[in-house]
Amino acid sequence: MKRKDFIKASAGLLTAAATLSSYTYANGMAEQGLKRLPKSLQPGDTIALTAPAGSIWNKWHIEKVEKILHEKGYRTIRGETLYLQEGYLAGSDEIRAKEFMQFIADKSVNGIVTMRGGWGCQRILDLLDYSVITANPKVIMGFSDITSLINAIFTKSALVTYHGPCGYSSWGDFTLDEVTRAVVDGKPFKMSNPFDYREDLKTWVPGKAEGELIGGNLTVLVAMIGTDYEPQWQGKILFLEEIGEEPYRIDRMLWQLKQAGVFEMVNGVVLGSFKDCEPEEPEKSFTLAQVFEQHFAGIKMPVYQGAAIGHIAPKFTVPIGVRAEMDADAFTIRTLERSVRL
């Protein structure tokens, strides 16, 4: 039995497959304009915690995020992947994919919060059944390595997903408020940095642009180019973040996006946090600011830097696939449609 067939059979999901053809899913739902919104999360709902990527080394984070969710009135259920390790992964690819699909198909689960990034989501993309995901829309949230999962799901299933905190993240008041606006209230809202996190804001190209939001971790997005899960870039607002990469690596990845034609297709770029992306030998390197200037100064679309996106404590929850307006002069992103349905 092939691995993908094993996942579908063992999860008992074959009967839940949607009626649309496999050809439709193989070629992506998002590009056909069939966008779907999950139902908003409300107190009393059940949120599943799962680890589709890296192993959970510090189990204290499980209790931390459960306490926060419980205080907000939610129930939680823990996946077995939270306690598994296979190398740097939270269990085998089959186990992680199976658990994810079980939570997708489980009608009692209203949302899924991933525990951490690391690496591993791209390894399971071939094992997921996107027709079942389409037939069971629910909130799916995470960031960092989870970038490949949430963008692949939107590309293949047209289900809006959420680039927001993982279980490992800091869940301060600002971050909690942003989660609430995106996946609980769901009305159009504006994302603007907190007052104590504005020192990195910079306009590279002024102006406004509209488009559906896509993006996440730069390294992960670049790795998706040329795969069946590569986002549909045309007309989008692209947001990017990174951690721990030297300027020459950032430069290399931005060149890959440029040479793949991405910057000719998107309507605007929002640069989030690029934490710890300084050169080890400054005298032999461009600065990160110089790399950004080389790529974005004078480009024919709005670009700004410093949005509260990425590996930082105050964090936006950005709905992947929702239409929005970015303002590179005001340093804001404003959604133009609901991000969850009532």
Image: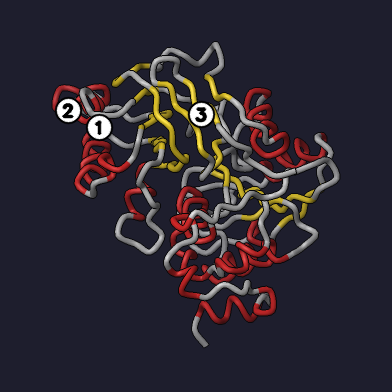
Q: Look at 43% across and 42% down and name the residue there.
A: 215
- Measure how far apart labels 2 and 1 are at the Cα level: 7 Å
Residue 133: in sight, yes or no? yes
Residue position for label 1: 247
Residue at the outermost front position:
33
- Measure how far apart labels 3 and 1 are at the Cα level: 19 Å
* Few, some or many residues within 10 Å of mark 3 (<14, 14–19, 20+): some
Mark 3 and mark 1 residues within 8 Å of each other at the beta carbon: no
Q: Look at 56% across and 32% down and name the residue there.
A: 336
Q: Quadrant of residue 283?
A: top left
Image mark for residue 285: 2
Image mark for residue 201: none
Secondary structure state at the residue bearing disc 1: helix
Q: Is residue 116 above or below residue 196?
A: below
> Relative to 339, is 210 on the left or the right?
left
> Relative to 291, is 73 on the left or the right?
right
Residue position for label 3: 312
- Measure how far apart labels 3 and 2 are at the Cα level: 25 Å
* Few, some or many residues within 10 Å of mark 1 (<14, 14–19, 20+): many
Mark 3 and mark 2 residues within 8 Å of each other at the beta carbon: no
Q: Look at 56% across and 30% down and name the residue there.
A: 316
Q: Position of residue 89 (x, y in %)?
A: 51, 59
Counting every numbered tag in the picture gives 3
